[in-house]
Image: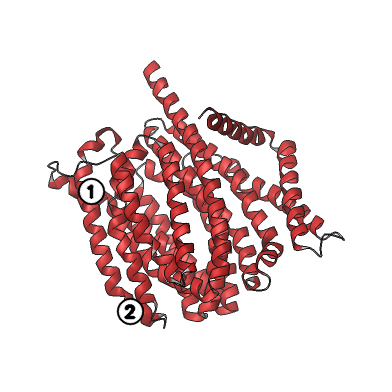
Amino acid sequence: MTASRGKISGVGQSTTSGFLWLVVQSFAARGIGFVSQLILARLLMPEDFGAIGLAYTVTGIANSLISFGIDDVLLQRQKSIGQWTTPAFWLSLGIGVAGMIGMIAFAPYAARWYHSPDLVGLIIAIAIATPLRTLATVPSVCIRAEMDFRFLATYNTFDIFALQLLTILFAACGMRAYAFALPFPIVAATRAVWFWRRSPPSTNRRFRVSQLRYLFGNSTVVLLSRTLIELVNQGDYIVLGLIASKTTIGYYFFAFRFSAQPVRMLAGNVTNVIFPALTQFRGDPVRQREAVVRASRLLGYLVMPFCFLQAALAQPGLHFLFGERWMAAVPYVVILSLGLPFDAMSWITGAFLSARREFTRAFRYALVSTPVFYGMVLLGGWLDGPMGVALAVALYYFTYPPAFSYLVLIGAGVAWTTVFEFYAMPAVLSGIAAAAGLGCALLPGIRNSDLLQCLAIGIVMCSVYLMLLAGFRRDMLNQILDRFSGLTSRLRRR
């Protein structure tokens, strides 16, 4: 019993440490991404953003096929992971090479489908990175199994910085949409070298055919789920590619890229921390469930105010930075920033299903979500063109991911009021804080200055949100402050 408690305590400490390190990475990545977005918005035109957005509809779906779910399945074998690295490596690399060939072969058809010949070169440039990226798959799983989140946070921050810096350099050199594509192979090769130096996997150990069958069989369901999820991720661009100009798609791509950053950074990092812990708690379903609820609640109270603040700052912020050049993107930023945060908690419940090896159940949910998403987006596009697509996307994320989380957590024994609370309460408090900030921005002496409006919205909204937390959810305020005070003390000691 003592040994078991010691193990659980160690996992808890590793999880907390991982959260702190990846919070640092989230803020660093957010800052890097924000600055990069501003620079690229000055160097590139909306049609350049539109071209790369269309290219991603091919490469994003293809890369979801290539990732194949081997990482999730391999992470389940933590106690015997050394016996599985060889078959996992060769299977992953083989699929990566096949995926690259497939993308290159499909590129001319995509260019013809979207009436955009420049997509061929963009897709090929991104495709070359695919087998290079798979070289780091197994080392990455080994590092996650060790819960060395400090290394992952440090490298991921460098990875984001290198990708954004190269994109800016290529854009400054006049590469236009290729500025987004050319950095991928360079960064993928660097990642492979760095991860192999940190945790080189065994690639020459003898393995059994049954191991390949196990990896392939269990990964297939994960593959299908990831493919359906990626079809949803790219569905709005697929529809827009058929009904909108490249310039309009560029405005939408710019807005989505800007709006999704807090969700992807925070939700992705929290999921990376919580998933290895959940796999180790597999024999203790109560602790596993409690960890999911705590992580979901904390994520809700962090991601909602970030996204609502983005929506409030969209109009004065973009006008202050770019004048009229990107004002057509403002409605998309507002709409998406209000819808996307409701997707964040579903990342954790998805990891919860994977940790419990309920891959088939996750696939069923993804199988339902895909036609729902496309039905909503097609209807939105038919009713109101690109703006209808944006509204449909926001409405989908406002409804389906919470329903998914609700069904998963209710089935695990979590009270429905608990699930409702970590969606509704952060949204209500963030909405009140945002309304207060926008109200101050309309005061005489402030409303005629974009900079003063941004300052008023930011200061008032953050202050009001913290006061509301202190009044209605002091426990969450204390938890957030404790996490960040622990982060500060750790960084000071280091």
Dividing the picture into quadrants, the one containing residue 117 is: bottom left
Q: Earlier in the sequence, mark 2 or mark 1?
A: 1
* Residue 294 placement: quadrant: top right
| Residue that carries the numbered disc 2 in the rendered image | 109
Q: Amino acid at mark 2?
A: Tyr
* Relative to 291, residue 386 above or below: below
Q: Residue at x 54, y 74 (%)?
A: 45
Q: CA distance from mark 2 to mark 1?
A: 31 Å
Which is nearer the eye, 481 or 192? 192
Across and down, in percent, residue 44 comes to 53, 71
Q: Secondary structure at mark 1?
A: helix
Compared to 267, does 179 lie above or below?
A: below
In the depicted structure, whether residue 85 falls above or below residue 378? above
Residue at x 46% of width, y 36% of height: 18
Q: Is residue 463 left or right of residue 493?
A: right
Q: Is residue 303 left or right of residue 116?
A: right
Report whether residue 89 is seen.
yes
Tell me which residue sits at (23%, 54%) in the image. Answer: 93
Q: Could you say where residue 192 lies in the image, as x and y percent from the top left?
A: 31, 50
Residue closest to the far right: 444
User: In the figure, is residue 219 to the left or right of 40?
Assistant: left
Mark 1 — residue?
A: 89
Mark 2 falls on what kind of element?
A: helix
Indicate the amino acid at tag 1: Phe
Q: Position of residue 442 (x, y in %)?
A: 82, 61
How many neighbours does mark 2 have within 10 angstroms: few (below 14), some (14-19), or many (20 or more)?
A: some
Its colouring scheme is secondary structure
Q: Quadrant of the N terminus?
A: top left
Q: What x and y, as percent, mark residue 255? A: 57, 65
> Is residue 218 depicted above or below 198 in this figure?
below
Q: Residues within 10 Å of mark 1 (few under 14, many from 20)?
A: many
